[in-house]
Image (cartoon, rainbow, N blue to C red):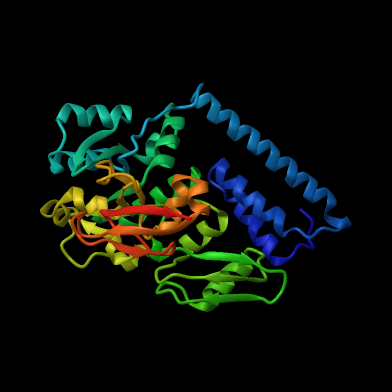
């Protein structure tokens, strides 16, 4: 390696050397390449790093193909919310599923071994649970695990009180290999790159100071841009957002914890963590439905007497305009207003505009020009 590299590049190269997996090394090499200045003295080094990146990408792709000779399929119904339950200890997974008392013991064992969903009804929708452990990632089911995780609406993380941080970090590391990170809406960060002007931090986070954010960005070679923080943005969610990972809603469940739950220790919002004992005392299905970040909306065509009995699942805070866009682009472009029934179809309808945000169980009739 040439010796006249910027300090940030030299620090990043050390991360390349210390990488524990090919995926991690690939990510670190890409960052390293972006930090190497482009001039005649670095031409050979940049070419060498590019060859390394290309070779690693080929190796990772080949390994994934060997793990699964054909793409895995996993069917998910339109009115189904899919939840992946992650725990380092398979015994903890089995204990949790047995405790909720919705599933037969044989079905639980089959699900743990074959990654088959355990499904149960919740009001007018279906909740499906797929238990898995990070240790399964190296198995022949790699492609199926990837498909399930990417289709999941909620990631449930089971932790034992004895090794909270270690187990939580293992889960985060596993998910990052599939391009996923866990964060609530209160934890996201949005970054916009700028050519000049330095780093501007908008809003405040409980877990990060403005100085920490600026230092973090400069360590990664980012000199200018605007970062919008949320109340619970952490270094983990900031870095994941910048890398472009896919965000998943999550619920952390801690076994045998009677004291104040360690939300700050894990760097997560307090409403994203619950003790197993408390969860079992409450309505389990309602709790996980609320954590999924989805709501049910019932469509009523203008010509229909009553709304559809089949709900449409959409993200919390979805607007009328976004709903129309999801249904059809022409409907969104020609949307004028909507009639909305909240609190039951027998209530008096409201006239709402395109920017109006929907809530669970809203009935809506879209009107066009």
Vertical position of residue 254 compared to residue 108: above or below: below
Q: Is residue 317 above or below residue 49?
A: below
Residue 115 in the figure: left or right of residue 23? left
Q: Is residue 154 left or right of residue 20?
A: left
Drawn side of residue 120 relative to residue 65, left or right: left
Could one spot residue 268 in this view of the protein?
Answer: no
State the image coordinates of residue 74 (x, y, percent, origin top left): 39, 30
Near-viewer residue (308 or 186): 308
**What is the residue that sits farthest to the top in this orientation?**
69
The part of the image, by quadrant, that contains residue 354 is: bottom left
Decide which of 167, 309 is in the foreground and name it.
Answer: 309
Q: Nearer the viewer, residue 312 or 272?
A: 312
Q: Residue at x 79, y 56 (%)?
A: 2
Q: Residue at x 51, y 56 (%)?
A: 240
Above-or-below relation of 211 to 339: below
Write down the quadrant of residue 81 in the picture. Answer: top left
The percent position of residue 273, horizontal first and vertical second, equals 27, 59
> In x, y percent, where is residue 367?
41, 54
Tag count? 0
Q: Position of residue 89 (x, y in %)?
A: 28, 42
Q: Is residue 316 visible?
A: yes
Residue at image position (71%, 56%) is 34
């Amino acid at each position: 390696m040439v010796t006249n590299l910027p300090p940030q590049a030299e620090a990043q190269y050390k991360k390349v050397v210390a990488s524990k997996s090919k995926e991690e090394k690939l990510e670190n090499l890409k960052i390293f390449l972006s930090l190497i200045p482009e001039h005649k003295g670095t031409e050979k080094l940049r070419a060498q790093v590019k060859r390394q990146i290309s070779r690693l990408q080929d190796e990772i792709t080949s390994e994934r193909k060997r793990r699964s000779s054909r793409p895995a399929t996993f069917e998910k119904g339109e009115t189904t919310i899919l939840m992946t339950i992650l725990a380092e200890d398979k015994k903890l997974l089995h204990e949790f599923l047995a405790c909720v008392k919705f599933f037969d013991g044989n079905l639980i064992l089959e699900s743990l071994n074959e990654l088959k969903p355990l499904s149960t009804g919740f009001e007018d929708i279906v909740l499906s649970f797929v238990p898995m452990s990070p240790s399964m990632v190296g198995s022949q089911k790699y492609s199926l695990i990837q498909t399930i995780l990417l289709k999941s609406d909620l990631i449930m993380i089971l932790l034992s009180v004895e090794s909270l941080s270690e187990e939580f970090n293992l889960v985060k590391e596993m998910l990052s290999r599939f391009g996923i990170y866990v964060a609530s809406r209160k934890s996201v960060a949005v970054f916009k790159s700028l050519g000049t002007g330095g780093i501007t931090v908008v809003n405040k986070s409980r877990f990060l100071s403005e100085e920490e954010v600026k230092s973090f960005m400069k360590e990664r070679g980012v000199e200018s841009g605007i970062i919008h923080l949320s109340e619970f943005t952490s270094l983990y969610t900031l870095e994941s957002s910048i890398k472009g990972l896919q965000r998943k809603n999550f619920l952390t469940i801690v076994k045998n914890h009677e004291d104040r739950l360690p939300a700050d220790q894990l760097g997560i919002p307090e409403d994203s963590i619950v003790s197993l004992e408390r969860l079992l005392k409450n309505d389990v299905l309602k709790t996980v439905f609320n954590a999924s970040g989805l709501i049910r909306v019932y469509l009523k065509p203008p010509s229909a007497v009553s709304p559809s009995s089949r709900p449409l699942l959409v993200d919390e805070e979805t607007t009328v305009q976004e709903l129309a866009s999801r249904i059809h682009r022409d409907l969104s472009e020609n949307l004028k207003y909507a009639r909305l029934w909240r609190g039951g179809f027998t209530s008096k309808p409201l006239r709402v505009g395109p920017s109006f945000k929907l809530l669970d169980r809203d009935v809506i009739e879209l009107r066009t020009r």
